[in-house]
Amino acid sequence: RWRNPEGSLVFPDQFIRSAEACGLIDELTDQMMTRSFEWGAKWMVEGLAIKISVNVSMGSFERLNMPEEVMLAAGAAGMDPRQVILEVTESRLMEDPTKILETLSRLRLKGIGLSIDDYGTGFSSMQQLKTIPFTELKIDRAFVNGASNDPEARAMLETSVDLARALGLSLVAEGVEVEEDWNVLARLGVDLAQGWYIAKAMPGDELLAWWREREG
């Protein structure tokens, strides 16, 4: 989220495509990585050692120097690269698959995790899982929200869980908003979940207080 000067929130779907169209997406991504890694390092010092995920547009992986840039940003912030996950978003098809696959493979060799975001929508496919060295699969909220009473969504969710396990991938469920869906994920053995049932999106300086309150 991006808070504008008037104080209201501007959501990613309102500016990501514009940034891509204007050639600003790489600069935006670099700034997001820098700030995210800085927060991750601060939280780690306070005892909250969590992985930091950053959404990256597919086109940004066409930069052959990207792995080195990510390592430099992580090192400058004091962030362990093994705690970094780049979430691959597919707002458009790969223009140069060979170049992108080379960049993604080099990122994995450096210990950086790769997540396929919003799996089950857009251009996501099993072919992507076969060719790209992903470490994590994020199930789109469309198959999570309401899964407790929607047989079709539940079937898609269960299929995704089985697929992730067969491929040795960590599994993240997006869009958890009610306890009933949380319980479904727990019974299926999903690794991680995100959504407003757990916490609303918050500024970085509020996370530690939220965490300590939940830890008791």
Image: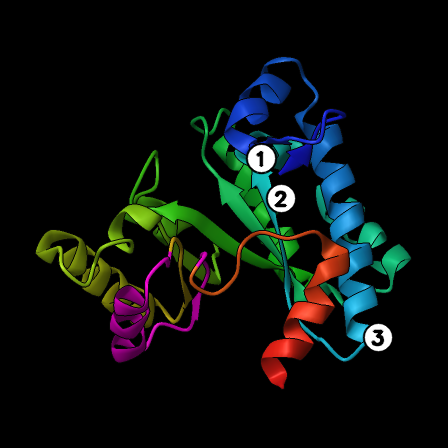
User: Callout 1 environment at 10 Å: few (<14), some (14 to 19), or many (20+)?
Assistant: some
Of label 3 and label 1, which has the lower sequence position? Answer: 3
Q: Is residue 86 left or right of residue 121?
A: right
- Residues shaded magenta: 176-196
Left or right, 95 with reference to 175: right
Pointers 2 and 1 in contact (C-beta within 8 Å): yes
Instruction: Let me know if residue 132 appears in the view.
Output: no
- Residue topped by disc 3: 45
The quadrant of the rendering that contains the C terminus is bottom right
The numbered dot on residue 99 is: 1
* Residue type at tag 3: Val
Tell me the CA gap for discs 2 and 1: 6 Å
- Give me the C-alpha separation between circle 3 and circle 2: 31 Å
* Badge 1 element: helix
Foreground tag (3 vs 1): 3
Looking at the picture, how far across and down is residue 76, in whole percent?
Answer: 90, 56
**In the rendered image, the vertical position of residue 203 relative to residue 81, given as above or below:** above
Q: Residue 50 magenta-drawn?
A: no
Most distant residue in the top direction: 22
Q: Which residue is mark 2?
A: 103
Dot 3: few (<14), some (14–19), or many (≥20) neighbours within 10 Å?
few
